[in-house]
Image: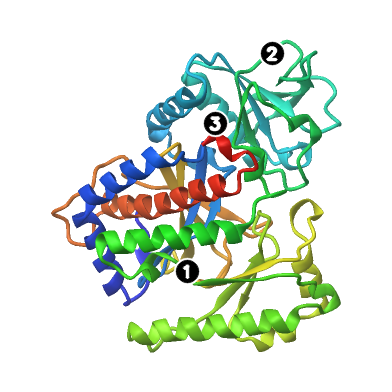
Amino acid sequence: MVPHLATALTGPLLDLEKKILDATPAIERWFRLEWQEHTPPFYCSVDLRNAGYKLAPVDTNLFPGGFNNLASEMLPLTVQAAMAAIDKYCPDARNLLLIPETQAQSRNPTYLQNVARLMQIFRQTGLHVRLGSLSPDVTQPTPLALPDGNMLVVEPLVRSANGRRLGLVDFDPCTILLNNDLSSGIPSILENIHEQSLLPPVHAGWALRRKSNHLKAFDEVAKKFGKLIDIDPWLVNPLHAKVSEVDLEHDQGTEELADAVSSLLSKIKKKYKEYGMKEQKPFVIVKPDAGTYGMGIMTIKDASEVRDLSLKQRAKMSVVKDGLAVTDLIVQEGVPTFEKIDDAVAEPVVYMIDRYVVGGFYRVHGERGIDQNLNAPGSQYVPLAFAQQHAVPDLKAKPGTAAPNRFYVYGVVARLGLLAASLEMERTDPNPEVY
């Protein structure tokens, strides 16, 4: 099923789809050359927003937790991509240690299904896969029940006698795969691992990672891409600004934030005017510079709303996952989603392993508006795997009518996010000599 675009503003986007499809050879060659210079993240998911007038990534996740939402027909492709990824780091790998989110998170049955799917993928690549827990409460092998009646077993992590390797009591892995975003900090057991590949590296976790670094890298990538296919980079890139040293709970930095919101709203208005979009009302999303799980996110349509925030809203904006305090905020151009499935708002999420798109799904939310964050805590979103996503684009189809064409375009824009994440990881690497 392809969600219909619930908007008359399809002109620019259909034009963008056509430009991308026409330029496919140039785009694929450009990506190929970029990957010779840069190492893609081990895996990554990108949330996109399709507004009818622009198609842009709004979030790039380096610890994707929804592999269970991909269509099962994509599994062979996913396994192939995982093989290519593992080959880069440890071609003769036999053992893989997977470190999921800690117990509190992993009580979530949907998340556990993601862990089970990851284990299935890596077993198919020829690896023995076991689960290690960062939780101090896990002192012996602990079973966790899956909704389908199967079991996962998490085990306590141990450092080797010489302190140089990480594994389980009777399990010495070549590769350690983190599916834990380290929001609560970098545990000492993960530090100074030099003999094994730790993927993604610890600086990809939210203890150190900042969205502002990613957005800066994405600006560069979007500019290059715009030049390559002759489009305005704004069509694939939301405008943004950063506001530092904010403490909303104690009314510190409120004016600076209101000014940043006001300034960004006028820039968006200017863009709307340039594209003759008289009906479109600009809005911005304010979110923490670090953190995940859709926490601490606000939709704002006027700077006065910042000054008038209630105490409850201020408190909510001041802390994200694992109690992480928020001091730096990102103000990002709001990109409405005009895709709908059965009258529920939908946004595409694209999954990648290494440099390959391995599938995607729609996050569908019946309770939210087109200008709201769909990845809200406690939200009931329905993952809907892309249909016909394994088909190649149909160059003869009219723009906007063929599912494989739309998914190819999603895959191109998502890979721009992947490339930006690669640049971001290089530039923020505390040990840059590896590159």
In x, y percent, where is residue 220?
Answer: 43, 60
Q: Which residue is mark 1?
A: 238
Q: Is residue 90 left or right of residue 129?
A: left
Question: Can residue 281 be seen?
Answer: no
Query: Badge 2, how many Cα within 10 Å: few under 14, some, many 20+?
Result: some
Q: Earlier in the sequence, mark 1 or mark 3?
A: 3
| Residue at 70% in and 81% down | 256
| Residue at 35% in and 52% down | 412
In the structure shown, which secondary structural element does the residue marked by tag 1 occupy?
A: loop
Q: CA distance from mark 3 to mark 2?
A: 21 Å
Label 3 amino acid?
Arg
In the structure shown, which secondary structural element does the residue marked by tag 2 occupy?
A: loop
Q: CA distance from mark 1 to mark 3?
A: 33 Å
Which of the numbered marks, if any, corresponds to residue 171? 2
Q: Which residue is mark 3?
A: 117
Display coloring:
rainbow
In the structure shown, which secondary structural element does the residue marked by tag 3 occupy?
A: helix
In the rendered image, the vertical position of residue 329 relative to residue 121, given as above or below: below
Residue closest to the far top: 170
In x, y percent, where is residue 221?
Answer: 41, 57
Q: Earlier in the sequence, mark 3 or mark 2?
A: 3
In the rendered image, the vertical position of residue 175 relative to residue 209, given as above or below: above
